[in-house]
């Protein structure tokens, strides 16, 4: 392994020669006669440590170290001041500028070598610690990503298990999540509810939307898969899935400290069947009493229901679904969101044609 490179900076040629002679058996020494010259050489080569004289004409040692510390490429290079100044004020000032040590002239070569060894060891340990922390951070990030990936997979699987109970075409969860993202992007582009959008954690929001129908796990298969029209009593049973879904989320909240995701999910579950005119369920909320998340999900959920095959009907065309949603403007749906939907409806149609899988 080669010797470490040390830069020795002093305007006195005798001092440079003496310093090089004292250090050359231990280090690869490059002598420089000014701070200006040092900065120039540092553009091409970096040393392990700099021995810097304080009293030099032009750019003195203090000005030189200031220049080193403001440059990202040189700020971490250890600097030891070599100076004839012996007052405590000068020493403290030099240390305050970022020097790691302050050695008064005349000095013992053996003492300088020992000081250099000490600070090179400290710097080596510092770099090892930085590398360790960087690697540790990467390990934590990788582990976190793995856990999040697992959580997302479990979440999607659970949602699709519910989905497949009453949607023979499958893919409802995936499609509605994509529709929701498109509608939010359209709303953002139009400037509508911009402050509200900024407050959302979009990844959590879209993931949580997958649980909007989780309460259907409580509804009998005979009702969910009924090929004909539901009786009033059966429809009342279906409506209960919103309340049951809320209860499921509340139970989960008691077992975890991560509530942001669950709060989003609870809003989607409880409000995606509310209607703008107050005729929805479960609570008959009206207008802006309905959270924005629920008003958005109402559009994407109904659109997907319209264009999809269900046990009781064949899917409508995209054009027919758009027409039905427009007819529900101001009654079933938030009028402003319907306008946004019209702006992005072609993207909905692309998702409709691309996505979807059969439940098995």
Image: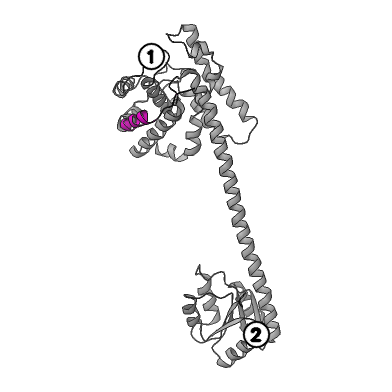
| Quadrant placement of the N terminus | bottom right
The residue under label 2 is 25
Magenta portion: prevailing SS class: helix
Residue lying at 67% horizontally and 82% vertically, measured from the top left: 112
Measured as percent of width and height from the top left, residue 163 is found at 49, 23
Residue 53 in sight from this viewpoint: no
Say whether residue 9 is magenta. no
Measured as percent of width and height from the top left, residue 46 is found at 53, 74
Measured as percent of width and height from the top left, residue 159 is found at 52, 27
What are the residue bounds of the magenta stretch? 344-360
Measured as percent of width and height from the top left, residue 281 is found at 47, 17
From the viewer's perspective, is 63 left or right of 337? right
Which residue is situated farthest in the front direction here? 360
Q: Residue 7 carries which label?
A: none
Q: Residue 313 carries which label?
A: 1
From the viewer's perspective, is 352 left or right of 116? left
Residue 136 in sight from this viewpoint: yes
**In the rendered image, the vertical position of residue 319 relative to residue 26, given as above or below:** above
Q: Quadrant of residue 14?
A: bottom right
Q: Is mark 1 on a helix, strand or loop?
A: loop
Residue lying at 55% horizontally and 78% vertically, measured from the top left: 62
> Camera-side residue: 82 or 317?
317
């Amino acid at each position: 392994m080669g010797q470490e490179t040390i830069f020795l900076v002093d305007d006195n040629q005798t001092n440079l020669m003496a310093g090089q002679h004292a250090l050359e058996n231990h280090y690869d020494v490059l002598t420089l006669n000014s701070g200006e010259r040092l900065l120039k050489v540092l553009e091409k080569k970096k040393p392990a440590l700099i021995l810097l004289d304080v009293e030099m004409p032009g750019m003195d040692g203090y000005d030189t170290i200031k220049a080193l510390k403001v440059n990202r490429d040189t700020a971490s290079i250890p600097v030891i001041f070599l100076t004839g100044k012996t007052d405590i004020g000068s020493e403290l000032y030099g240390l305050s500028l970022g020097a790691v040590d302050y050695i008064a002239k005349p000095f013992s070569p053996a003492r300088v070598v020992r000081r250099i060894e000490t600070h090179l060891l400290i710097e080596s340990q510092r770099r090892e610690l930085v590398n360790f922390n960087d690697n540790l951070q990467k390990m934590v990030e990788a582990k976190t990503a793995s856990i999040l990936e697992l959580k997302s997979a479990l979440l999607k699987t659970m949602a699709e298990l519910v989905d497949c109970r009453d949607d023979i075409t499958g893919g409802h969860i995936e499609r509605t999540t994509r529709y929701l993202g498109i509608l939010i992007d359209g709303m953002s582009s139009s400037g509508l509810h911009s402050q509200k959008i900024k407050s959302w954690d979009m990844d959590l929001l879209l993931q949580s939307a997958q649980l909007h129908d989780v309460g259907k796990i409580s509804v009998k298969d005979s009702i969910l898969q009924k090929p004909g029209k539901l009786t009033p009593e059966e429809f009342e049973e279906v409506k209960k899935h919103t309340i049951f879904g809320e209860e499921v989320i509340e139970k989960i909240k008691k077992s975890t400290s991560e509530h942001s995701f669950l709060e989003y999910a609870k809003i989607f579950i409880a409000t995606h069947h509310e209607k703008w005119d107050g005729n929805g369920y479960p609570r008959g909320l009206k207008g802006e009493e309905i959270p924005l998340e629920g008003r958005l999900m109402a559009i994407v959920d109904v659109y997907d229901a319209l264009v999809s095959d269900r046990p009781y009907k064949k899917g409508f065309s995209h054009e027919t679904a758009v027409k039905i949603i427009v007819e529900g403007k101001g009654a079933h749906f938030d009028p402003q969101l319907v306008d946004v939907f019209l702006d992005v409806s072609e993207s909905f149609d692309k998702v409709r044609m691309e996505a979807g899988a059969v439940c098995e």
